[in-house]
Image (cartoon, rainbow, N blue to C red):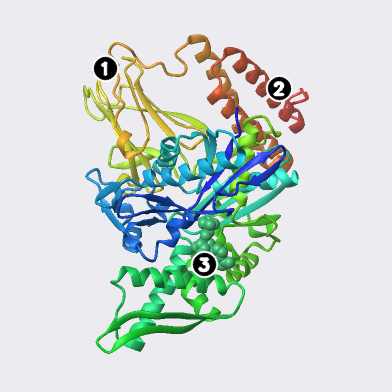
Amino acid sequence: MGKVIGIDLGTTNSVCAFMDRHDPQIIINEEGGRVTPSVVGFSKMGERFVGDVAKRQLLINPDNTIYAIKRFMGKRYKEAIREAEMANYDVVETPEGDVGVVVNERIYQPHEISAMILQKIKKNAEDFLGETVEDAIITVPAYFTDRQRQATKEAGAIAGLNVLRIINEPTAAALAYVHERRCSSVIGVYDFGGGTFDISILRVDRDVAEVLSTRGNNSLGGNDIDERIVRWLIDEFERGQGIDVSGDRVVLQRLRDAAERAKLDLSSITETEINLPFLVADASGPKHLQTTLTRNTFEKLAMPLFEETFKECRMALEDASMGPNDLDEVILVGGSSRIPRVQEMARNLFKCPLNKSFNPDEVVAVGAAIQGAMLGGEVKAVTLLDVTNYSLGIEVEGRRMATLIPKNTTIPTVTNQLVSSVVDNQKVVRIHVLQGENPLAGDNVSLGEFELHGVSPAPRGVPRIEVRFAIDVDGIVNVSARDQRSGRSEEITIANQAAIGPLKRDTEDEPDQVLGDDPQLADLRGKVERELVALEALLREQRGQLHQKDIFEIELALKRGRMALLKSVEAENLEELLVYLQRFHDHVQGKLGVGSASVPIH
Ligand code: AMP
């Protein structure tokens, strides 16, 4: 395996890192920078520029310069109307209901634009390393949905990259932490970037990084702060000059630029001058914008956004069953975490040291590079136990959602549920896959649907249809349904819009081979599953009698068991797992005085 690069594909900037033996290094781009602006510009002749050059043409050619494309990745148009209004370029709804951006009369999909950024990153990495680069780990916000992850993977493929893993940005930051510290603690990763906000609570150990909970908002970042300053500038200008400039794209881009610069200044000084000569002109001559923004006013403008991030933090703590005092450290990630008021609010909430030793712009890419080196066996692997950030389920009678995988379940995971028909002799069952936390199906996000045909005729409620949900290490969902009597099955991988829809197979000739079809394997899987359920019950019933350390060990054994169950298709491995779990169970019972055995568990 050649070098694996770690890419933080950011809303504002992207960063690429690799492991130089045991040390993570940032790849310097061809302009000599450590970060590459996530901006793609097109000339009228169709020439393409990516990065700093594109960013420079934002002011003069805003229509043909695409920035913050990450905000549209994998989104349906109706989910992105607010972002579309903020964009300086043309955003349209494609016939499929997705987002498209228009440049030189051509419509590009967001993942195609992201692929252009990734292509540049790949080329820069190849120039820097002097070798061909194919394998990459790309990070995404923890709160990215399945479609957004798929879109990111697709962008990588278009750019000629073999995307080994998609990992969550805060988890990558935690990996960088584990790599450097190798100590046990509970940490928070507060990641406030240009376009997104994430908070994750993790328990890290020498060789395990376990995500306990994660919350976030995919449409909350530094760009929104800039927008609030822009609004304020528009109002100031209108008050002073009586001219509304909100409809002029070039003016808006100048205001955005000035707003961001003012925001950056206010992280180190308490007031800043905003000076934009010749902003517009009317019959009486040119009009200039000149004003002062104080840190106080800035904080008032941005406070609702800051508060929103801490609301998410409180929920993440609650999800992890933790209080603010339970964290040992909070790592600050993302450029917006440099804002002094944000740091003060973080200190007030978390009552623990804020770790600023990592560069907030680079730590995510570094973590991704470490993950790459772990896969390649160059550095000691840390078991990464990540979680799903949304509940997943199916629509059932009464337009309700039945949850199959609750939010914050460790991934990879697999779960089965039996469903049945709602009318007599029903031959077709529709499986509508949903994502969200609302009891009513219509209030959740629809991920896709498919039909299972050929269900054996029977009275209502009699057929047994096994619905199986699996989430892989990239957080990508696969759903299958199988009529136990007829053996008919159908499945979908929830993918980007283009791929959504039943992956039709000829189920007549070739019934799906689902896990458990081999009788010996099915028997072993059943035994392992029962052992895991028994261990879960033991934990539930005896939690009060167990030490925190034992609880952690049991939870870990359960997670390792579930992971192995998901991956293993070899009878031998399953037998080993079964023996391990049985011994472990005996060991815990021995500790509790319930059983007699006390055996080593490792
Ligand atoms: P990221 O997505 O992590 O690259 O974060 C980029 C965002 O961080 C942009 O909105 C920047 O304007 C913002 N940012 C970077 N440095 C600072 C700073 N010193 N103070 C406030 N915001 C910053």
Q: Tell me which label, 3 or 2, sits earlier in the chain.
A: 3
User: SS class of the residue under badge 2?
Assistant: helix
Q: Residue at x 44, y 59 (%)?
A: 55
Name which quarter of the figure residue 66 lies in.
Answer: bottom left
23 w.r.t. 601: above or below: below
Q: Which residue is mark 3?
A: 306
Mark 2 sits near ligand 1, with its Cβ under 8 Å away: no
Q: Tell me which label, 1 or 2, sits earlier in the chain.
A: 1
Depth check: 566 or 587 in front? 566
Q: Answer whether residue 111 is visible to the viewer in this image.
A: yes
Amino acid type for the residue under numbered disc 1: Ser
Q: Position of residue 340 (x, y in %)?
A: 61, 70
Q: Position of residue 519 (x, y in %)?
A: 48, 10
Residue contact between numbered discs 1 and 3, judged by CB atoms under 8 Å: no
Q: Quadrant of ligand 1?
A: bottom right
Q: Which residue is mark 1?
A: 456
Q: Residue at x 59, y 53 (%)?
A: 34
Name which quarter of the figure residue 131 lies in.
Answer: top right
Q: Which residue is mark 2?
A: 583
Q: Which part of the image, by quadrant, shows the N terminus?
A: top right
Separation (CA) of disc 1 from disc 3: 56 Å
Callout in the foreground (3, 2): 3
Q: Position of residue 243 (x, y in %)?
A: 29, 83
Amino acid type for the residue under numbered disc 2: Arg
Depth check: 502 or 176 in front? 176
Separation (CA) of disc 3 from disc 2: 49 Å
Name which quarter of the figure residue 336 lies in.
Answer: bottom right
